[in-house]
Amino acid sequence: MSNWRPDFQPEHLYFVTTKAVDYAHLFQRDVVKRLLVDAFDCFRARKRLKLFCYIHNNPCQPHWGLSATPAEYIWSSARFYLTDEPCIIPIDDARRLLN
């Protein structure tokens, strides 16, 4: 087992993304989405990370076809930023970084 750990700097913002081979729909079932969201929220609760948002326009891409607008997709944080309504994903408000 390796002792390697990533060297994250707390004062930096990181953009994390993944791409599935052939755009495989890995997160079709809500229970799988919920597991991922709960894992992120656990790290947030322990002050290990802050989560500010997903790529808002991804659900609108033709190859996904999940929604017509970013705010319509229930699993998107776009709803929070575009309408000030709470979203299903617990996030930290990125607008506070600008103040």
Image (cartoon, helix red, strand yellow):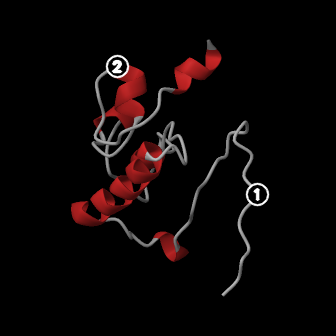
In the drawing, what numbered circle is on residue 7?
Answer: 1
Q: Is residue 85 visible?
A: yes
Q: Is residue 35 above or below residue 13?
A: below
In terms of depth relative to the viewer, which is nearer, 7 or 19?
A: 7
- Residue at horizontal 47 percent and vertical 39 percent from the top: 56
Quadrant showing the N terminus: bottom right
Amino acid on which disc 2 is placed: Asp
Q: CA distance from mark 2 to mark 1?
A: 34 Å
Q: Secondary structure at mark 1?
A: loop
Place residue 35 in its image quadrant.
bottom left
Across and down, in percent, residue 19 comes to 56, 66
The residue labelled by disc 2 is: 84
Residue visible at 71% across and 67% down in the picture = 5
Of the numbered discs 2 and 1, the one sitting upstream in the chain is: 1
Where disc 2 sits, the SS reads loop
- Residue at 37%, 41% in the rendered image: 76
- Name the residue at 27% across, 42% down: 74
Q: Nearer the viewer, mark 2 or mark 1?
A: 1
